[in-house]
Image: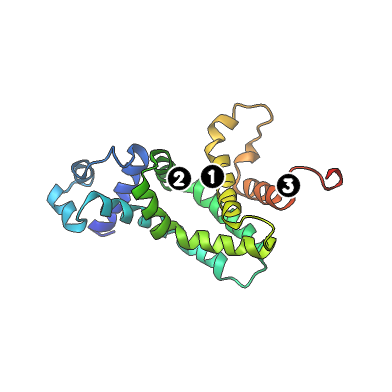
Amino acid sequence: MDSKENILQIAVTLFSKQGFDGVSMRDLAKAVNMSTAAVYHHFPNKHALYLQAMHFAFAKQESAFDEVWQAELEAEEKLRRFVNCLTQVLTEDVDFRRFMQRELLDADDERMQLLAKQVFQQQFTQLMTVIEQLSGSQQPVHFSALSVIALVCDIIQMQPLSRHLPGWQAEHEEVDFIATHVLNLLMNGIKPKGNQ
C-alpha cells in the first residue's frame, strides 16, 4: 500500500469514528506517522481528502455492485442481487457503514451533494432503472429506490438494539436472512396475499 492509500485507509477509519468535524489534517498526519505538510502534498484540503476517502471506502465494494448491474438478468434478480450485495457491504465493512451513518447525521448539504453526485449517483440510477422495470409507472421510482436502501441500512443499524427485543434470533443478523427478508417485503408487502 503506498502512502496515499495508507492515508485514505486511516482517514476512512477516523472519519467513521469521529465524523468530518472531529478529524483535522493534523490528527490524520499523526495517525499515519507523517508530517501535516506531507498529507497536504497528497490532498489540497480536508474536503478533497474526505471525498477521496469516501470514494476509497466505496471503491472496495464497487466491483460487486457493477457485477450486479452489468449481468444479463431479469429485473427482479438484479434487485435481489443488489439487496444481497448492499447487505453484505454494510454488514462486513463497518467503517464504510459508520462513515455513511455519520454523514447522514451531520447532514452537511455541501458534503451530501458531493456524496450524491460523485459517489452514489451511478448506483442509485441503476437501482431506479431496475425498480422502474419492475413497477412500470405504478410507484414513485426515486422514493422506492430510497426505500430499498433505507430498509437494508436501518435493519443493520438496528441490530444492537434488536438483540435485546423479543423474538430476536441470531439468524436475523445473517446477510442472506436480511437480504431475503427485505426482498420478500419489497416484492410481497406485509399482508398475506389472501388478506388484501
Mark 2 lies on residue: 97
Q: Quadrant of residue 97?
A: top left
Foreground pick, 142 / 5 = 142
Q: Nearer the viewer, mark 2 or mark 3?
A: 3
Foreground pick, 165 / 75 = 75
Q: Quadrant of the N terminus?
A: bottom left
In-image side of 38 versus 69 (left or right): left
Secondary structure at badge 2 equals helix
Q: Residue at x 67, y 68 (%)?
A: 74
The residue under label 3 is which amino acid type?
Answer: Gly
- The number of callouts visible is 3
Secondary structure at badge 1 equals helix
Q: CA distance from mark 3 to mark 1?
A: 18 Å
Discs 1, 2 touching: Cβ within 8 Å? yes
Q: CA distance from mark 2 to mark 3?
A: 26 Å
Mark 1 lies on residue: 153
The residue under label 2 is which amino acid type?
Answer: Arg
Crowd around label 3: few <14 · some 14–19 · many ≥20 (10 Å): few
Can residue 57 be seen here? The reply is: no
